[in-house]
Image (tube, grey):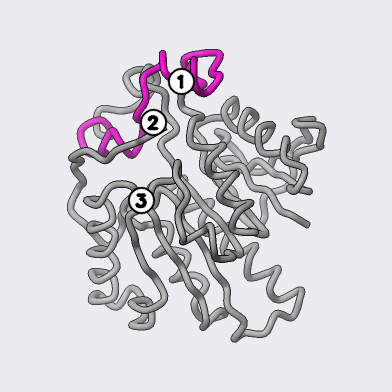
Amino acid sequence: MNVRPSNIKHPPPSDRFIEPETEAWTTHLAHRVLCNSSSKSRASDAPLRILDLCTGSGCISLLLHALLHRAHPSLEILGIDISHTAVSLARHNLSHNIGKALLPSSAISQIRFEDGDVFTRHAAWANTQWDIVVSNPPYISPEGFDRTTTRSVRNWEPKMALVPPVSPEDAFSALGAHTKDDVGDMFYPSIRRIALEAKAKMVVMEVGDMAQAERVATMLLEEKAWKRCEIWKDGITQRSEELEMKELGGQKVAVKGEGNGRVVVAWRD
């Protein structure tokens, strides 16, 4: 499959440009990383390498740096997006936040944004090991975009960042989709492949709802390299308790948080 960029529009960069649901899970992810580093007595100067696929405005990369750089001074984050417009915006947001003193000056050398297509082989992940792969890919089906998104989202968010660039007919034939909503799942197999190629210890993928979370978790666990899996709902915090266990992909998957299913997380060990 050959996905190509198109012209997209974005709201102006600002000091706060991340959706609250995405901010919640990104903050919780940083907390889990910090707790894990502390429990394993990881040396503070040991590198921590994070690959952010479908980075868009770069908001996840920038927030992770803000939360992790003190504990990990050798932090390295690379954001990848197929849209050069998005990459340019992410770079602008990086400079903007450093200029506003919302990020330290070290961020300019520790965060990079590059053009890349997750459906093709790329040197960034084919030849390099990354500790964590995160992604907030386009996950809304074409039908769901018209049915479930708000007017403000449709007016301000680039459709390319929300809806996979493929027709439902192509998805049914090439991706094995069974319903129109399944078309929104097309990025996840590639993200799984990249996480394996990058030898990532952890993969974190945002999804649209609980049904999609269950499909993605099942797909992910088809690859036996992933030993543990969780689904995080909206509002996930370090105080969130396990709500239930689901049997998915032959494994028990813990569901945590409240509200809508938002993130699928898996670990190698």
Label 1 vs label 2, nearer the camera: 1
The part of the image, by quadrant, that contains residue 120 is top left
Q: How many marks?
A: 3
Residue appearing at x 67%, y 50% in the figure: 240
What is the secondary structure assignment of the residue under circle 3?
strand
Which is nearer the N-term, disc 1 or disc 2?
2
Question: Residue tagged by mark 3?
Answer: 81
Residue appearing at x 45%, y 70% in the figure: 65
Is 165 part of what is drawn in magenta?
Answer: yes
Q: Nearer the viewer, residue 252 or 219?
A: 219
Quadrant of the rendering where the C terminus is positioned: bottom right
Mark 1 touching mark 2, by CB under 8 A? Answer: yes
What is the secondary structure assignment of the residue under circle 2?
loop
Amino acid type, mark 3: Asp
Q: Measure how far apart labels 3 and 2 are at the Cα level.
A: 13 Å
Question: Residue tagged by mark 2?
Answer: 164
Q: Measure how far apart labels 3 and 1 are at the Cα level.
A: 21 Å
Q: Residue 171, labelled with which disc?
A: 1
What is the secondary structure assignment of the residue under circle 1?
helix
Quadrant of the rendering where the N terminus is positioned: top left
Q: Position of residue 50 (x, y in %)?
A: 52, 64
Question: Start and end of the magenta stretch?
Answer: 154-182
Q: Measure how far apart labels 1 and 2 are at the Cα level.
A: 10 Å
Say if 38 sits above or below 154 in the image: below
